[in-house]
Image (spheres, grey):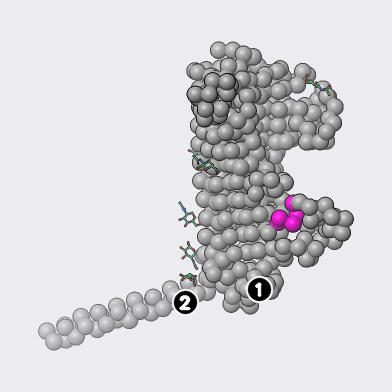
Amino acid sequence: MKSFILLILLVVFHLHISTVKCRLLLEHVTNEDTFNVLDFGAFGDGVTEDNQAFEKAWKATCKSMSSTPTMVVPSNYTFLLQPLIFSGPCESNSTHVLINGTLVAHEDPKKWECISKGCKQWIAFDDLTKDLYISGSGTIDGRGSNWWGSYCENDEHKKSCSHKPTGFVIMNSINVHISGLTFLNSPQMHIAIERSDSVYVSNLTIIASADSPNTDGIHIQHSTNVFIEDTNIGTGDDCISIGPSSHINISRVNCGPGHGISVGSLGKNGDYDTVDYVYVSDINFNGSINGARIKSWQGGHGHAKNIVFERINLIGTKRPIVIDQFYCDHTTCHNQTANVQVSDVWFNNIHGTSSSMVAVRLACSESLHCKNINMKDINIQSIDVVQSIDVVHQIRTTSSYCINVQGKLEGQVFPPVPCLNY
Ligand SMILES: *[C@@H]1O[C@H](CO)[C@@H](O)[C@H](O)[C@H]1NC(C)=O
Ligand SMILES: *[C@@H]1O[C@H](CO)[C@@H](O)[C@H](O)[C@H]1NC(C)=O
Ligand SMILES: *[C@@H]1O[C@H](CO)[C@@H](O)[C@H](O)[C@H]1NC(C)=O
Ligand SMILES: *[C@@H]1O[C@H](CO)[C@@H](O)[C@H](O)[C@H]1NC(C)=O
Ligand SMILES: *[C@@H]1O[C@H](CO)[C@@H](O)[C@H](O)[C@H]1NC(C)=O
Ligand SMILES: *[C@@H]1O[C@H](CO)[C@@H](O)[C@H](O)[C@H]1NC(C)=O
Ligand SMILES: *[C@@H]1O[C@H](CO)[C@@H](O)[C@H](O)[C@H]1NC(C)=O
């Protein structure tokens, strides 16, 4: 009996030792998994450039064979960074970058290292071909205001301002997940997704002033399977712009100020561009210039088709629904016969107010009509009606402009779009 109790005690003791050992082992592994930029020499004082430390921490993270190596950018520090490329491929099947601190760029464009060759971008992730997770509650601040306005118009600065960098780029990558972060004041576009597949964007905030030029929130090009969800964007250009790409799914986005969610512009300089399968749903446009838009240049080739915009709420949107095959951002563009074919488009369940009279504008070319354009359950009223219903002389009603378009209406559609039939 005594020896039996002893045996039990021994077993219990042994179990206890093993769990302690096991826990120590786990903690050890966890530490080996984590690569904090401070441990690699970063200052985080917002004044000293921290590129070297970030490069070292990334190299260690990317080389790590552990299951979830994580590069950590801690909170309560501000890291000043010159343009930086995080290159892959990495060893692990699941590499993480946790950004809780703040990243800032030089405020003075002349201080950017790449300035003589033209800076393409500030921060890039390139050639990451296994799962990469970029997340955190941190802020990525391009401090781009000097790139936007009068500073760059000054002769002394003109040259250094001639190529405005994109803030943050994901390129040549597969299975990238970005979430939680805040992006501010990029010199040009905030986030570009290029030549990539399976990119999942969620829970981001992207902010720049309404008059900052070309500061698109997210630009997608030459990419497939891009998902953007639960994101707030207010900038000086398109909240989201979609260049040549396919299978793009955007949902639960708040957009405004900004130029809306745009497919295009496609076919610039006679290019052959295609966009297929774009699904945009559950969007709030608040004070944006455009809402749902498809735009192409004359003289271009290719197509934009299978595009759905649905469940869209508008607050004072200037041009809520736009198809424009005559896109031209400079003063003169000639009418040409070639164009990008726009077809199989659905605008469903779109409600709210417009700040201009022409709430629906479908402008397609004489030589290449837009085909199978569908509208269902649309009700867009003038913002004046809603705001001053009692001031009779201010009541204006919305209308539509429609040329060279073939398609169908379903349900209630206001304003009427007479070139489409029930
Ligand atoms: C950052 O600072 C805040 C406020 O001072 C503090 O509550 C928090 O614990 C700090 N976080 C870290 C990781 O040191
Ligand atoms: C990564 O995934 C592949 C394929 O599933 C597997 O063979 C490999 O062992 C994994 N590598 C690591 C480091 O876990
Ligand atoms: C980073 O921030 C997230 C969200 O605020 C928090 O859950 C996480 O613990 C933080 N991680 C570190 C390493 O500070
Ligand atoms: C969104 O990100 C913030 C950090 O920026 C985090 O606190 C919050 O939990 C995230 N929400 C969801 C639904 O993931
Ligand atoms: C797009 O994403 C939404 C939200 O995650 C999902 O409900 C929907 O099925 C997706 N649509 C397509 C066409 O993939
Ligand atoms: C729309 O934007 C305005 C101005 O930023 C803000 O005051 C208002 O609360 C927003 N409305 C909604 C419904 O989000
Ligand atoms: C081009 O064609 C459109 C529609 O047919 C017409 O409204 C416009 O005036 C033309 N522009 C030029 C420069 O000829």
Q: Is residue 289 visible?
A: yes
Q: Nearer the viewer, residue 312 or 99?
A: 312
Q: Secondary structure at mark 2?
A: helix
User: Horizontally, is 230 left or right of 235 in the view?
Assistant: left
The residue mark sitting in front, 2 or 1, is: 1
x, y (%) of residue 98? Answer: 55, 63
Q: Give the residues in magenta.
A: 144-148
Residue 145 magenta: yes
Residue linked to disc 1: 53
State the separation of the CA atoms marked 2 and 1.
23 Å
Which quadrant: the C terminus? top right
- Name the residue located 67 percent from the left edge and 27 percent from the top edge: 323
User: Which image quadrant is residue 340 in?
Assistant: top right
Dominant secondary structure of the residues highlighted in magenta in the image: helix
Q: Which percent across, then down, holds residue 329?
A: 78, 36
Q: Secondary structure at mark 1?
A: helix
Q: Residue at x 63, y 34 (%)?
A: 290
- Residue indicated by mark 2: 28
Note whether 201 is above or below 76 in the view shown. above
Residue at 65% across, 49% down:
209
Q: Is mark 2 within 8 Å of ligand 3?
A: no
Up-down: is 261 above or below 53? above
How far across and down, in percent of the image, does residue 355 sit? 60, 30
